[in-house]
Amino acid sequence: HKGLLPSLATVLQQSALPVELAAEVAPLTQLLRRRTSRLRLELRRILPALSRAELDSMVLKGPALAGTIYRNKIDRYYGDLDLLLKRQDVERACDVLATIGYKPAMTVARPEWYAQHHFHIQLKSPAGLMLELHWELTTPHDYIRFDLDGIRERSVTCELEGQAASIMCPEDALLHLA
């Protein structure tokens, strides 16, 4: 899985990796690390913008894991950013993020259908980076439901890219990713 490649590359660099394999893995690893670095830097724009607007958000998945459980945060690849907000704050968050260049990503579904049958909206930065604003962690039709108020109460604050960020406690993160 490409998400594991940067971590695997780090481990393999410390071993006797065949030259041919190293030559094959290196370009993809560098590409994934560059993309992840761009996304990490984007958090420096997004989190303060939401904070200034007094919108509470929780960083999910990739950056939260990279900042807490990986020895080298660049070893955790992720292809987009995911934030959890209260449902009633999503529209205002979209407006705030529009001031820093984010626009709704193109989808084949109408926004009304997407909001009724999905659990996040996708935004795209001017550089083409994807941001998902979640109001739930599962689709409305899934039989698994998360206690979002409980997740917010158990959340912890950590530093991500020089910004204080709310993330899930380890137990909730494990359940969410399972």
Image (spheres, rainbow, N blue to C red):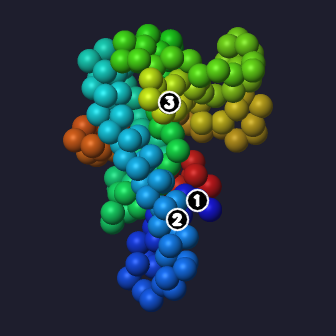
Disc 3 residue type (three-letter): Gly
The label shown at residue 128 is 3
Say above or below: 30 vs 43: below
Residue found at x 75% / y 20%: 108
Q: Nearer the viewer, residue 98 or 65?
A: 98
The secondary element bearing badge 2 is classed as helix
Q: Residues within 10 Å of mark 1 (few under 14, many from 20)?
A: few
Q: Which residue is mark 2?
A: 5
Distance from Cα at disc 3 to Cα at disc 2: 23 Å
The label shown at residue 45 is none
Disc 1 residue type (three-letter): Lys
Disc 2 residue type (three-letter): Leu
Residue found at x 75% / y 37%: 142
Q: Which residue is mark 1?
A: 2
Distance from Cα at disc 1 to Cα at disc 3: 20 Å
Q: Residue 139 location in percent, x, y?
A: 70, 32
Q: Residue 25 location in percent, x, y?
A: 52, 69
Q: Residues within 10 Å of mark 2 (few under 14, many from 20)?
A: many
Say above or below: 70 vs 162: below
Q: Reading the chain from its start, which is encountered first: label 1 or label 3?
A: 1
The secondary element bearing badge 3 is classed as loop
Q: Give the quadrant of residue 70.
A: bottom left
Can the viewer see residue 167? no
Q: Residue 121 location in percent, x, y?
A: 59, 24
**Image quarter in which the N terminus is found:** bottom right
Residue found at x 50% / y 73%: 23
